[in-house]
Amino acid sequence: KQEVTQIPAALSVPEGENLVLNCSFTDSAIYNLQWFRQDPGKGLTSLLLIQSSQREQTSGRLNASLDKSSGRSTLYIAASQPGDSATYLCAVSGSGSRLTFGEGTQLTVNP
Amino acid sequence: EAQVTQNPRYLITVTGKKLTVTCSQNMNHEYMSWYRQDPGLGLRQIYYSMNVEVTDKGDVPEGYKVSRKEKRNFPLILESPSPNQTSLYFCASSSPGLAGGEYFGPGTRLLVL
């Protein structure tokens, strides 16, 4: 059974810092990996999708990498802003369109 | 605009009173899923559907039913809700193989008294 772990569970940084969120998964047989953002009490917003054949994806200040063989992904956020404060979720897809989620990293960016 | 819609967004009910949460997507996606999100347990899949009339259990299907009579709709049915089904529910859809990623609805917050 696939298990996804995100470290750290919570992170507080001053505005302007670059930061890295980590995601690891136990079964490397994945179709893709997706990073989501969730604001309190809200739905999930997809940030980046990395196909299993890719090694990284970039969108603005966000860069996600994937090392399938070692079961790891990182989400790099450059020049963090208070508006980046949210919970970041990592999810991997397996057979049958099933997504397995990590429990998330709660990020707070202080002005 | 591509979207997944859920109704209602908020619902308070009592134990045993049947309810249905509707989900609809306008992207012609084959795959649709339901998830529940609970503190300390994260997001867990309840049921999924790979196409019309094809549904299968996810990780936590007990106490729930689904149906997929049309491609765009995937309602979640609680025949006899119980307090342990109090949760935040998300519907999602995607194309085969999740090539385009999974799209999530805004969520339905359910309280069962």
Image (cartoon, grey):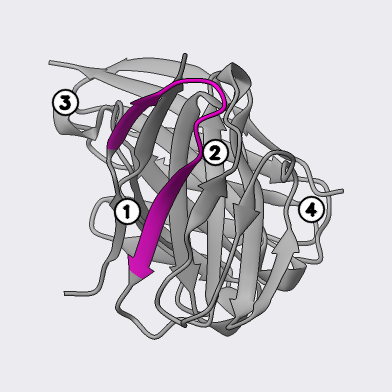
Checking the image for residue B92, the label placed there is none
Which amino acid, mark 2?
Answer: Arg
**Residue most extreme to the left:** A111
Q: Which residues are magenta?
A: B10-24
**What x and y, as percent, mark residue B21?**
41, 49
Reading the image, the residue beneath label 4 is: A70
Mark nearer the viewer, 2 or 3: 2
Residue A48: within the magenta? no
Q: Are marks 1 and 4 in contact (CB under 8 Å)?
A: no
Residue B40 appears in the figure: no
Q: Secondary structure at mark 3?
A: helix
Which amino acid, mark 4?
Answer: Ser
Reading the image, the residue beneath label 1 is: B6
Mark nearer the viewer, 1 or 2: 1
Neighbor class of circle 1 (other Cα within 10 Å; few <14, some 14-19, many 20+) is many
- Label 1, label 4: how many angstroms apart (C-alpha)? 37 Å
Reading the image, the residue beneath label 3 is: A82
Reading the image, the residue beneath label 2 is: B36
**What x and y, as percent, mark residue B44?**
63, 41
**What x and y, as percent, mark residue B112?**
47, 21
Main SS of the magenta part reads: strand
B50 displayed left or right of A64: right
Quadrant housing residue B1: bottom left
Neighbor class of circle 2 (other Cα within 10 Å; few <14, some 14-19, many 20+) is many
